[in-house]
Amino acid sequence: MRLLGWFLLLMALILGIWMVWGGSYEERFTLAGAVEVLEGSGDLAWLFGWGLLVSDVLLPIPGTVVMSALGWVYGILLGGLFAAIGSFIAGMTAYGLGRTLGHRGAVFLLGERDFERGRKLFEHGGGWLVCLSRALPLLPEAVACTAGLVRMPLKRFMLALACGSLPMGFVFAWIGATGKDAPLLAIVLSLALPVVLWALSRLLSRRLEMRVEQSHE
């Protein structure tokens, strides 16, 4: 399956980057180091934080540490908002990179059959993949880029991305603001809350679609 091969290739590329440069970035971007970098940016610390989170699409920058640093600098609410927006922008960037190949480029890479399989997969179950992948290592960039490649509907992708980015941003901002060291709790919340948000959003979307259909009858 070319689709699986493409996904594994992305994962291998991301893992390879982490293996080559990840150690040096992790040494620099400890929580204290990330806070120092953000505070050194003055009033534009939030913008610099966004830049770091977007850079995580290609570079081995620990995004959760940057989110925690935003919480340290701005507090839980504002820091969480900045962290969530940064994660959302990063996801949109990866999605955009996948879509830049266009339909012809995607079919050339995947073949017509696997392209259609990928399109159907992300059209129907892609929301779960996108929202849950935000809290897992390596997967966010690969999933978002693949979603763009197979032309997952933009509105659905954005909604799923928001459902994954919002909880993650606020959870890690809370950790940074309070100084708590709770990685297991952070992972659990970052996985559980997106499930709830995505399920609610799909329920509301279906009800809205039903009302629209009834109004046209």
Image (spheres, helix red, strand yellow):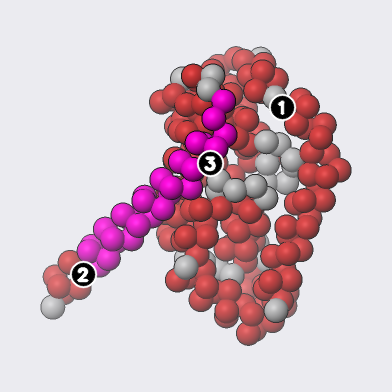
Label number found at residue 210:
2
Of residues 190 and 71, which is closer to you in this image? 190
The residue most toward the bottom is 113
Disc 1 versus disc 3: nearer the observer: 3
Q: Position of residue 1 (x, y in %)?
A: 70, 79
Disc 2 to disc 1, C-alpha distance? 48 Å
Q: Specify the segment rendered in magenta.
A: 181-210
Image quadrant where residue 206 sits: bottom left
Of residues 75 and 88, which is closer to you in this image? 75
Question: Mark 2 belongs to which amino acid?
Answer: Met
Asked if one can make out residue 130 in the rendered structure from this viewpoint, the answer is yes
Image quadrant where residue 69 sits: top right
Q: Is the magenta region chiefly helix, strand or loop?
A: helix
List the residue tagged with mark 3: 187
Q: Give yes or no for residue 138 being in the magenta stretch.
A: no
Q: Position of residue 121 (x, y in %)?
A: 52, 73
Disc 3 versus disc 2: nearer the observer: 3
Q: Position of residue 136 (x, y in %)?
A: 60, 48
Asked if one can make out residue 46 in the rendered structure from this viewpoint, the answer is no
SS label for mark 1: loop
